[in-house]
C-alpha cells in the first residue's frame, strides 16, 4: 500500500459510508471532496469538531494509505479535481462538463 498523497481519486470514484450517512447517494464524485490548495481532503473531516474528527479519521482510515492499483492520478502533479454542487442540476464540474471525469 502506498502513502496517500491526497489525489482525490477514491472520493471521486464513490462517496464513502460517512457521506452516505449524510444523505449522499449513488456513485462519485463525493460532494464533500475539497481542494486545500495543495491536496484533496474530506470536507466532513475538515469541518468536524475534534471528537468527531477523531471518529471520522478512524472510520475513513485516514493515514492508512492508497490501496488502489487503478489510481493513475498518483503519477502526475496534484491538481484540483473537486466538483461544484448546486441545487439545480446536481453538480457541474469546473470544466463545465458534468458527465466527464477530469483528466
Image (cartoon, rainbow, N blue to C red):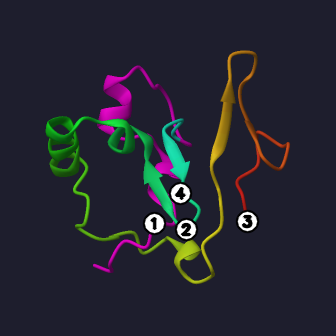
Q: Are marks 1 and 4 in contact (CB under 8 Å)?
A: yes
Prevailing secondary structure of the magenta residues: loop
Q: Are marks 4 and 3 in contact (CB under 8 Å)?
A: no
Could you give the CA–CA distance between mark 2 and mark 3, rounded to whole angstroms? 17 Å
Q: Which residue is mark 1?
A: 6
Q: Could you tell which of marks 2 and 3 lies nearer the N-terminus?
A: 2
Q: Nearer the viewer, residue 47 or 11?
A: 47
Query: Which residue is the extreme one toward the bottom?
Result: 75
Q: Nearer the viewer, residue 51 or 55?
A: 51
Q: Report the residue marked by disc 2.
A: 38
> Which residues fall within the magenta stretch?
1-29
Residue in view at x 42 percent, y 75 percent: 69
Residue corresponding to mark 3: 103
Neighbour tally class for label 2: few under 14, some 14-19, many 20 plus, Cα within 10 Å? few
Q: Secondary structure at mark 2?
A: loop
Q: Secondary structure at mark 1?
A: loop
Report helix, strand or loop for mark 4. loop
Q: Quadrant of the N terminus?
A: bottom left
Q: Are marks 2 and 4 in contact (CB under 8 Å)?
A: yes
Of residues 44 and 67, the one drawn nearer to the viewer in this rendering: 44
Occupied quadrant, residue 83: top right
53 left or right of 81 in image = left
Which residue is at a point 31% across and 24% down the rendered structure image?
21
Distance between the alpha carbons at the discs numbered 1 and 4: 10 Å
The residue that disc 4 covers is: 36
What mark, if any, has residue 20 been given in the picture? none
Q: Position of residue 40 (x, y in %)?
A: 50, 58
Foreground disc of the pair 3, 1: 1
Amino acid at each position: 500500500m502506498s502513502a496517500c498523497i491526497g489525489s482525490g481519486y477514491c472520493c471521486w470514484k464513490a462517496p464513502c459510508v460517512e457521506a452516505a450517512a449524510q444523505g449522499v447517494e449513488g456513485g462519485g464524485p463525493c460532494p464533500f471532496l475539497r481542494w486545500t490548495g495543495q491536496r484533496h481532503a474530506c470536507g466532513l473531516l475538515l469541518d468536524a469538531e475534534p471528537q468527531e474528527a477523531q471518529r471520522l479519521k478512524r472510520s475513513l482510515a485516514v493515514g492508512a494509505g492508497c490501496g488502489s492499483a487503478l489510481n493513475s492520478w498518483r503519477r502526475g502533479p496534484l491538481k484540483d479535481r473537486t466538483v461544484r454542487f448546486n441545487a439545480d442540476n446536481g453538480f457541474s464540474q469546473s470544466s463545465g462538463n458534468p458527465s466527464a471525469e477530469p483528466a
